[in-house]
Amino acid sequence: MLTRPLGKTGLHVSILSLGGSSLGGVFHDIQEDEGIRTVHLALDHGINFIDTSPYYGVTKAETVLGKALRSVPRDRYYLATKVGQYDEGVFDFSRKRVLKSVDESLSRLNVDYIDLIQCHDIEFADIHQIIHETLPALHQLKETGKVRHVGITGLPLKVLRNTVEKIRPRYGRNRSVLLPI
């Protein structure tokens, strides 16, 4: 499987990744053992980047993924998950919830660190809160080693561009801000 650099992170991720929403039964019910086999098959075929969220299946995706990864050496994959969205229409980007969310994800995923933590669908958030509360909390977690890289996600490119422009004065141009689109 070919790999490519992920922004300025130093991570070289497979050109195909495994999205975790299906593991949470977002599109249709899934048997846990099928999900675990899917993860193992993806890894065996060279996929090394897995993206999920506590929102997918209201924590089911992270739980199934954590069971699948339990027997896999940590150096075989990069793991991305998110903070901020937890149920349909339920967003909470507060510092307190973000810090708690990362610990909950680490526990469900059975890992000591997350390679990429992302603010989920920031178009539904107060950008002031993202910049002055959420991102500083995530960067604090980066300093502790619980997360390696911090990013943002969203659908409208305009929202992502505007957010990056507002972040730059606070974090500078040399800080890597990822825009997974």
Image: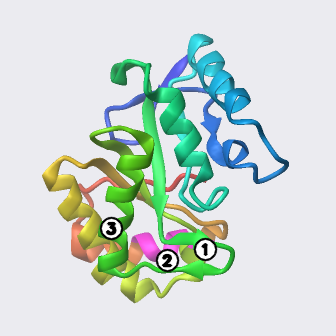
Of tags 3 and 1, which is closer to the observer?
3
Say the numbered circle drawn on residue 162: 2
Residue ID for mark 1: 158
Q: Residue at x 48, y 58 (%)?
A: 82
Task: Give the quarter of the figure containing the N terminus.
Answer: top right
Q: Secondary structure at mark 1?
A: helix
| Mark sitting earlier along the chain (3/2) | 3
Q: Residue at x 54, y 28 (%)?
A: 68
| Mark sitting earlier along the chain (3/1) | 3
Q: Are marks 2 and 1 in contact (CB under 8 Å)?
A: yes
Residue ID for mark 3: 100
Q: CA distance from mark 3 to mark 1?
A: 29 Å
Q: Given the image, on which type of amino acid does mark 3 rest?
A: Lys
Vertical position of residue 115 compared to residue 121: above or below: above
State the extent of the magenta-drawn residues as a range. Answer: 158-164
Q: Main secondary structure of the magenta part?
A: helix
Q: Nearer the viewer, residue 64 or 138?
A: 64
Q: Dividing the picture into quarters, in which one does residue 163 lie?
A: bottom left
Q: Nearer the viewer, residue 81 or 63?
A: 63
Q: Given the image, on which type of amino acid does mark 1 rest?
A: Lys
Vertical position of residue 94 compared to residue 147: above or below: below
Q: Position of residue 3 (x, y in %)?
A: 51, 21
Left or right, 132 with respect to 181, comes to left
Q: Position of residue 28 (x, y in %)?
A: 85, 48
Q: Secondary structure at mark 3?
A: helix
